[in-house]
Structure formats: C-alpha cells, structure tokens
Amino acid sequence: GFERIDLNRASAGVLRVPGRLVERLAELPVDCDVSSALMRIAIQAGVPMREVPAAARADAGWLLVRDANEAHAAESAWIDRFVARAGSRTPGQLAARLALSAFGPGILHGGYGSRSVMAATLVAIAIALGAGVFGHVAAGFVMCALAWILARVTGLVARIEDVSAQAPSPLSVEVALGWLVDIAIVVLVVWRAPLLPWETWWARGFAPLALLLLLRLLPRAIDRPALVWCEDRTVACAVLAIAAVAGQLEHAVAVAVIALLAA
C-alpha cells in the first residue's frame, strides 16, 4: 500500500509490526484507514524503517507499473538484467544471449517457460543422435551445438522464473542438459563408422570421453579467462563437424586430447 509519511515523500513497501502494536487499532474509530493507522502507530513506537537503496530503486527490480505499455517495458528491462549476467565471451554464449533477448518474452508468456525450452533441447539431442545413426555425424554435431545453446537459454529462463535463486544449483536443469549434450557428442564420435574386428566400444569411446572430461576440468582447475572457451560446446562441435567432413575425426579428437593435457 501507499502512505504519505511526511510532506516531502511518499513510499510503498511491506509493514511488519509486533502484535502488541496491532492491538492499538482497537483504540481508534471503526472507520479509520487501517494501513495508514498501522504505519503511524509503528513510527510512533519506534519501529525502524529501512529504505531500499537508490541504486536498487533505479533498477528494473523496483518499478511502479501503471499500464500495459509500462509492463512490457519493465519486462524487457527485467530480461536484459539476466542477459547481462549471462556473459558473451564465446560464440555460444552470445547466441544464447541473443536468443533470450529475442524470444524471452514470448517464452515466458507462453505458459511453459523453461520447460518448453528444455523440451526443445531434448528434441535437438534426439535429432543429433538420429543423424548419427544414419551416418550424418557432422550434422549431428551441428544439432549438439544447437542443443547446448538451448540448454543455456533453459538455465537463463529458469533463473528468471525463480529470481530467489542466488546461484545455480549443482543439479540444475542446465547442468543436467549440458551433461546430456556431452554424452551425445561422445556417442557421435563412437558412431562415426562401424567397429573394426580388433576394436571395442570402450577403446573407441575412451578418447572422446577423455576430451569432454578435460573440457570440463580445465576451466575449474586453471584460472585463465581464455579457458572459458572450453565450456562452449558450439566451438567444440564446430571443430568436430569440420573434422568429420574432412574424414579426420579420430585424429582431431586425439590431437585435442593431447593439447588439453599439455595445457
């Protein structure tokens, strides 16, 4: 509610007072304004008043919305806050930011929110694996790159929906989808060609599995800004897709593992 405390300012907020002060309402006429009366009783009793900092009031988190146009403007500013936090140092991160800016309001208004983007991510992973079954490994890597971007958007939309989350949970949807994308990449490398008589699935899968685990390990083990590129699966998928088209996928994976180990 709104209450004019003095001649110079008006405020809106949340009022929390002890029950003993609420009992004083019984001393007032029955036609009194309860909100106004409680505010003045609290001030007279010395209940502390804490103001929201001016910097926070100027942000998109504290707005007085009067009509639909202001609501749409506030919504865009609200989404932009989360987009700014997402970072854009790599192509995949930039693509996720652009997608959220362009389609975020529509996703949130659709009624399904992050669940709809999560479903799209799972569909992209399924298409990638289907392409691998039919021998189109390069196309599968392209779909894995798209799935990773959608997984990032899923995480951003989920954080917009739950603004009380101060940090992403270790078991968040975005993390789970990221692991699924990595598993799909390993499977595509393993499915690049039929097994030779002397090969086993484990022997073929070891190198790509080591590659994906190294891509996850390095940014956490070594504090270097450039290593953020290891987290971007669109870059890894682009390299693997080019290697697959050139018929050098196995060698590219081996060289990448050696390079990451050297790093």
Image: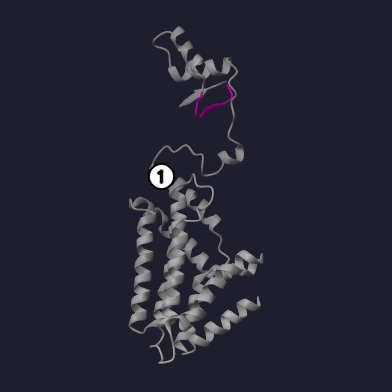
Using a 10 Å C-alpha cutoff, classify the residue at mark 1 as few (fewer than 14 neighbours), some (14 to 19) or many (20 or more).
Answer: few
Number of numbered tags placed on the structure image: 1
Kind of element beneath mark 1: helix
Q: Quadrant of the N terminus?
A: top left
Region in magenta? 7-16
Residue at the extreme bottom of the image, as rendered: 197
Residue 11 forms part of the magenta stretch = yes
Residue at 40% x, 53% y is 105
Q: Would residue 110 be found to the left or right of residue 261 on screen?
A: left
Residue 102 x, y percent position in the rendering: 43, 59
Pointer 1: what residue?
A: 69
Q: Would residue 99 be found to the left or right of residue 135 on screen?
A: right
Residue 174 forms part of the magenta stretch = no
Residue 64 x, y percent position in the rendering: 47, 37
Q: Examine the rendered structure and indicate whether residue 118 appears above or below residue 163.
A: below
The amino acid at mark 1 is Asn
Q: Examine the rendered structure and indicate whether residue 257 appears above or below residue 56.
A: below
Q: Quadrant of the C terminus?
A: bottom right
Residue 33 x, y percent position in the rendering: 43, 16
Residue at 46% x, 65% y is 178
Residue at 46% x, 50% y is 160
